[in-house]
Image (cartoon, grey):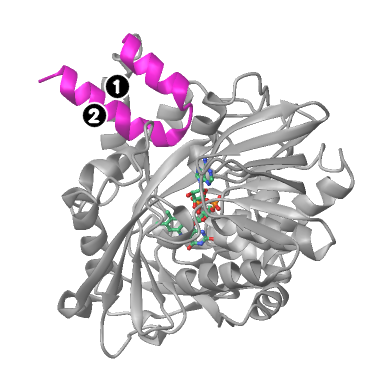
Amino acid sequence: METTRTADVVIVGAGIIGLACALELAQSGTSVALIGPCAGRHPGQASRAAGAMLTVFSEVEAAHPPERVAIEVAERVAARVGYEAWLDQLAEGGQPVTLTPGVWVTANTPTDRAELAAIAAAAAGAGVPGELHSPGNVPGLVSETVFEALWLPGEAGVDAEALTGSATAAVLAHPRICWLDTDAVTVTEAGSAMRVATAAGTTVTAEQVVLAAGVQIPALLRHSPGLELAAPPVLAGRGVSMVLDATPAPVASPIRTPNRGFACGAHLVARTDGGLYLGATNRLSTHPVLDRCPSVDEIATLLHDGTHELNADLRHAQIREARVGYRPYTTDHLPLVGRTAHPKVLLATATYRCGMLLAPHVARLIQHEVDHPGALLDHPYSPRRSIQTPGLTELLTAHRTALADVICQPGGSLPAGTAAALGGHLCAALAHQLADPAVQRLAASAPVEEVLPLLLDVAGRRSQ
Ligand SMILES: Cc1cc2nc3c(=O)[nH]c(=O)nc-3n(C[C@H](O)[C@H](O)[C@H](O)COP(=O)(O)OP(=O)(O)OC[C@H]3O[C@@H](n4cnc5c(N)ncnc54)[C@H](O)[C@@H]3O)c2cc1C
């Protein structure tokens, strides 16, 4: 049966970002209709596939330009500062979440030394310095390759499953939020309001719409003709993670390697039910298929990195489950939060590898923009910002070592100091493919460094 509902704001998407926005708006007195699957397996959802580490500093890479580091770290610090208070708010819904302070970052390869130095500099710059330790001081680390580890007291870990469960309970308990357990199919203008039609037949009209549907925002927009947002594209970083049963659970605070090979390295995060999270791969997916299972290659990479770089004893652990999540991101790797060129449509997405950390911060920004239209226009997350997209040659030059790392996964290693040279050879070979229309189409659809491994695949197929 078709029904119509009204609310001040309608939010599309009930991952951690949609849930956080719904609560923040409702708590400030706004009536909210939240549209998105509530129960079920949530195939492809990033939030339930996440760690979740609160990685304020450890996502910094030595190769990141200082201005990028300054913006990203400042926003992540803002998110971290209010995190415990946010967890207390969620607990009012009846499901408290425990936060485990600190994250260990290991150095396993010679190049990791520079990565740890960049991370340590970011932490020191924010007034929460890290401490270098020998591997023997890291609880739960059983690895012959680690030669030092950085303890970051300003970071933390939470259980992503428990966190999304707690946020779900808080949203369901809130009297100003109406949750429609279905998908939005179109977003259109309806006079001076916005209308969102759902797969269940219900239509919601509201003054403003917040799109928080992650990597499915482009699909929703394709079905919503006439909606011009003029926003940067939303890309998908496919991530595979696992939950292991390892007794006794080896880690309390999360342990991770630095980012490498266009991914966030290997990491272990304790779950509150005794499980152990092992994450995560990251591969650009130009056509995300939400229910596509993990591939043998993705699992092999995860297991290799987890057992070699972090804890060799995990070879005895049982595999409880593997999950796939698609991280939403955009070409400059900063989130998209705020009003679009359409005055009644806001975006809350593209949190990439830090959405579990950024959720309460994004929600506060959205609430501020809803109450004060235009307030976020100059914010670094504004969907109205202009983004300089790098050319392919520039990307190839800047990321040659990461390209060599990808070729070596899982487990292959190069003699010390040769990754840059191999990367150089790969770049030279790929340079000959740049005029290929398929390569140009691919690069134009995702002008980011994560496209480079896909270009290698294309080049490999061409040469067969
Ligand atoms: C393997 C992995 C590890 C990660 N580790 C970390 C970490 O350690 N720390 C950290 O901070 N972040 C981490 N992240 C990133 C974080 O998970 C994401 O940034 C964040 O979850 C994005 O949340 P979201 O709500 O925008 O998207 P999602 O969680 O993907 O949620 C989007 C929701 O929108 C719904 N939806 C889609 N289309 C529609 C529609 N038409 N109508 C209604 N609903 C719709 C989907 O069903 C989905 O539930 C990780 C991600 C992955 C995949």
Query: Is residue 414 visible to us here?
Result: no
- Dot label at residue 430: 1
Residue 244, by quadrant, is bottom left
Residue 307: x and y, percent?
A: 23, 70
Horizontal side, residue 259 vs residue 303: left or right: right
- Most extreme residue toward the bottom is 248
Disc 2 element: helix
- The x, y position of residue 43, in whole percent, is 37, 52
Separation (CA) of disc 2 from disc 1: 10 Å
What residue sits 22% from the left and 56% below the top? 299
Residue 184: image x %, image y %? 55, 40
Mark 1: secondary structure = helix
Between discs 2 and 1, the one toward the N terminus: 1
Residue 135 occupies quadrant: bottom left
Q: How dense is the environment of label 1, judged by Cα within 10 Å: few (below 14), some, or many (20 and up)?
A: many
In front of the other: 112 or 55: 55
Instruction: Examine the structure image and report whether residue 217 is included in the region drawn in magenta.
Output: no
Q: Which amino acid does label 1 sit on?
A: Leu
User: Which quadrant holds the N terminus?
Assistant: top right
Amino acid type, label 2: Asp
Q: In this view, does 420 lie to the left or right of 200?
A: left
Q: What stretch is highlighted in magenta?
A: 436-464
Mark nearer the viewer, 2 or 1 = 2
Q: Name the residue under label 2.
A: 457
- Vertical placement of residue 358 versus 164, above or below: above
